[in-house]
Image (tube, rainbow, N blue to C red):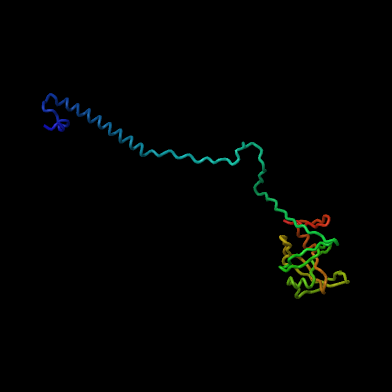
């Protein structure tokens, strides 16, 4: 007889039938417990989510204690940063006059800086270069070296000296020939300031 079938079949003798049944009950109980334990542990391992990784810790750029004195004082929100101040130094000639070349509406024109002149004053020849000599009404009397002359009011689109530029400058054109253009207060007052120290005129602006 095949011994592999004896495990599942009851023994032939009636006296051993109860013992065989008890043996089968114990064997299947143990097998069922093992299967239950395996299935339960497998489902637990599959359903449990891995622990979330801890967020990366940001390193402090400044490792000093928070109550340590800071090197720089932070500005309150909304407080404007002071603009950078620019300067331009102009050296006077031996006669004390400060000469400078400026671009007026893009045309290069030589000037004498005249702090006593109310307006920027262009000669007629320089006004032609700057493109502002046409259709003028010469009604303003002014004093010149040769006596009294007439001038016409104008507005200059731009006067530029190196990196310094001022827009919409009031000025005038002097009627007649000769002379030199003057850089007066209508330009200088548009700056942050100007100062004559020794033989150097310093212009400052923002």
Q: Is residue 94 left or right of residue 60?
A: right
Residue 61 lies left or right of residue 186; in this view the side is: left
Q: Quadrant where the N terminus lies?
A: top left
Q: Whole-percent x and y of residue 100? A: 78, 63
User: Residue 128's x, y, as percent?
Assistant: 75, 73
Residue furthest bottom in the image: 135
Q: Using the rendered view, name the quadrant where residue 192 is placed.
A: bottom right
Can you say whether 6 is above or below 147 in the image?
above
Furthest residue in direction front, as rendered: 94
Q: Nearer the viewer, residue 22 or 99?
A: 99
Number of marks:
0
Residue nearer the viewer, 76 or 131: 131
**Residue sitting at 85 percent across and 72 percent down?**
149
Task: Kindly give the residue lying farthest to the top in the view shown.
Answer: 15
Image quadrant for the C terminus? bottom right
Dividing the picture into quarters, in which one does residue 130 lie?
bottom right
Residue most extreme to the right: 147
Front residue of this view, candidates 159 and 54: 159
Q: Residue at x 38, y 38 (%)?
A: 48
Q: At which x and y percent is residue 6? A: 15, 30
Residue 59 in the image: x percent, y percent?
A: 55, 40
């Amino acid at each position: 007889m095949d011994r592999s079938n004896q495990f599942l079949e009851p023994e032939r003798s009636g006296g051993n039938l109860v013992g065989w049944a008890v043996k089968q009950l114990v064997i299947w109980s143990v097998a069922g417990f093992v299967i239950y334990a395996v299935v339960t542990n497998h489902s637990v391992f599959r359903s449990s989510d891995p622990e979330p990784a801890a967020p990366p810790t940001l390193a402090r750029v400044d490792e000093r204690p928070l109550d340590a004195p800071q090197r720089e004082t932070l500005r309150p929100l909304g407080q404007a940063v002071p603009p950078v101040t620019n300067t331009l130094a102009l050296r006077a000639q031996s006669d004390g006059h400060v000469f400078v070349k400026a671009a007026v509406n893009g045309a290069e024109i030589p000037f004498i800086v005249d702090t006593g002149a109310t307006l920027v004053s262009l000669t007629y020849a320089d006004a032609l270069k700057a493109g502002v000599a046409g259709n003028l009404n010469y009604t303003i009397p002014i004093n010149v070296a040769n006596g009294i002359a007439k001038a016409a009011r104008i507005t200059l689109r731009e006067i530029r000296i190196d990196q310094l530029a001022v827009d919409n400058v009031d000025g005038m054109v002097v009627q007649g020939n000769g002379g030199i253009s003057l850089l007066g207060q209508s330009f200088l007052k548009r700056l942050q300031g100007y100062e004559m120290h020794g033989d150097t005129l310093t212009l400052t602006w923002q």
